[in-house]
Amino acid sequence: MAKYIFVTGGVTSSLGKGIFAASLAKLLQSRGYRVTIQKFDPYINVDPGTLNPYEHGECYVTEDGAETDLDLGHYERFLDIPTSQANNVTTGRVYQTVINKEREGAFLGKTVQVIPHITDEIKRRMLLLGQSGEYDIVITEIGGTVGDIEALPYIETLRQIRWELEEHETLVCHLTLIPYLKSAKELKTKPTQHSVKELQTIGVRPDILVCRTEMPLTDDMRKKLALFCNVDRNSVIQAMDVDSIYAVPLELQREKADETVLKKLQLPIGTPGNLDKWNKFLNDVRNPKSEVTIGLVGKYIELQDAYKSIHEAFIHGGASNHAKVNVEPIHSESIDDNNAAQLLGHLDGVLVAPGFGNRGIEGKIAAIKYVRENNIPFFGICLGMQCAVIEFARNVLGMSDAHSTEMNPKTAYPVIDMMEEQRKVKKKGGTMRLGAYKCDLKKGSLAEHLYGSEHISERHRHRFEFNNTFIEKFENAGMIATGRNPDNKLVEIVEIPAHPYFIGVQYHPELKSTVDHPHPLFTGLVKAALEYKSKHKSSKKAVLN
Ligand code: GLN
């Protein structure tokens, strides 16, 4: 049977519970344990699929098509193993299950209550992955902050699980903030003491305190925290601010967090894991030999989290080229044909982001026209690929009002149209084409060259697609479908072979980029940007000479 580690948060939100969970999991994995991480989110939405990215950041999609919290992206990027529907649970989903059971009469006339019915359902889901036999350790991150009304049923369930299982079968890591007061020149432990007290009021005593801090903790502070928060001296773990989230596992290793956890769970400590590959990656991130600037054209650019996986995939793809990628966010609403040169002319590459709806669409199309005509490396993802198709139709094929029927249902040239299976769909939540689908690549294409294979599988999240009735016109004019679904022939990739680097994909490659396996399309874009930069610079020099 698996052992369970719970991660709670105190004092403030945004302390990085997800990164901590992923980093601890990485260390345990490197010691040979089979680890997975799950996240419980206290909000009422059934999943984040219907949430605006401004509210919740990116919606991360798993292989099995679940729309989930972006922390699952961190889990996958760190552990290099896929997560699933079971790895993310929300209050909405818990209530939905309980209410459906109530409607079926499953509670036999009983009053349905938070305790025991909601907590029983939370418990069932918390223990589920651990019962599969696939994992030795399940780490459960509880969203929100201790003391939130919404988090209460989760902490209560955690208390019950602790009570039911043996002491060495569960562990609570409480992540907390140790603020530094500039005026007093001091780190303060009081907020942590209060949040631990809050946790203890519900009957949960943390085993390990993980202290987020901008200054190192002194021995005296560690002693004080241990004494007043009722934990062992070596269970106060310092988590200093670092320059990269990928440095966190190494910081935790220095603090012997993994050893402390394994001892408490009465699991063999074994030999320290081999993190050579990880260290090499971090070294490449920290010591790049060159740099490129790539524009990220999107409409949610004010919020970094909205394109989380894209930013991380750039870090992976940069490191594999020994290069730093400066991602320059460009608001799609700000671009038009007149200012495109000014906004994009200095870039070494452009990525046009995924998205929904009309806002900013013309700016994305204008950006693509500019990079296509000026041979700047281009990568379009999902809506970005669809915009590349629309731009080509309008400006190369002369279909002046060509559009996606998502934006203009009455267009004379519906080059992007709703998928057949989507036409009958009425409900919004969880009904897009979601999750992993196979794709066959054309021999000799850029895609085949980059993937090094003719058969791939990638994750999707969309309702619209390339309208195959137009394919001949596109291919005759130089935009080629180089990736197709083998079963229904949906176009998944378009390329312009006459352009130095022009590729648009209907799926989301950013979701599969990990530290161990940087995504070939991001590695490829960075490489193309480096080549463009060196060529461009030398030609500029030639002009100056
Ligand atoms: N809105 C487009 C569609 O549904 C693209 C979606 C996306 O970019 N994820 O097809």
Image (cartoon, rainbow, N blue to C red):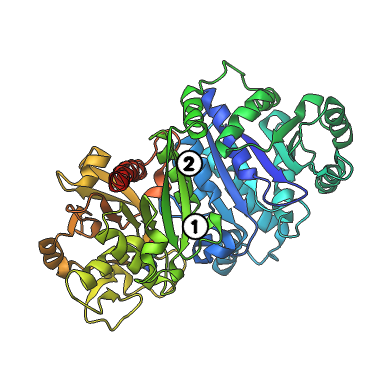
Rounded to the nearest angstrom, the CA distance separating label 1 from label 2 is 14 Å
- Mark 1 or mark 2: whose residue is earlier in sequence: 1
Tell me: residue 391, above or below residue 23.
Answer: below
Task: Count neighbours of disc 1 (C-alpha within 10 A) and say few if under 14, some if 14 to 19, many if 20 or more.
Answer: many
**Residue 421 % position (x, y):** 29, 68
The one of 102 and 366 positioned closer to us in this rendering: 366
Q: Amino acid at mark 1?
A: Cys
Task: Check the image and report above or below for 500 versus 466.
Answer: above
Question: Is 30 placed left or right of 468 in the picture?
Answer: right
Left or right: 398 in relation to 149: left
Q: Nearer the viewer, residue 12 or 395?
A: 395
Total label count?
2
Q: Secondary structure at mark 1?
A: loop
Residue 168 circle label: none
Q: At label 2, which amino acid type do we have?
A: Glu
Dot 2 falls on a residue whose secondary structure is helix
- Quadrant of the image where one finds ligand 1: bottom left
Question: Is the C-beta of the residue carrying label 1 under 8 Å from the nearest atom of ligand 1?
Answer: no
Relative height, residue 416 to residue 123 (above, below)? below
Residue at mark 2: C-beta within 8 A of ligand 1:
no
Q: The N terminus lies in which quarter of the figure?
A: top right
Q: Examine the rendered structure and indicate whether residue 102 appears above or below residue 541.
A: below
User: In the image, 55: left or right of 391?
Assistant: right
Tell me where residue 377 appears, x and y as whole percent. Answer: 30, 51
Rendered residue at 23%/78% (across/down): 400
Q: Residue 59: give its label.
A: 1
Q: Which disc, if any, is residue 76?
A: 2
Residue sitting nearer the eye, 433 or 220: 220
The residue at the far bottom in this view is 410
Position of 465 with respect to 478 (left or right) is right
Residue 543 seen anywhere in this rendered image of the structure: yes
Rendered image quadrant of residue 461: bottom left
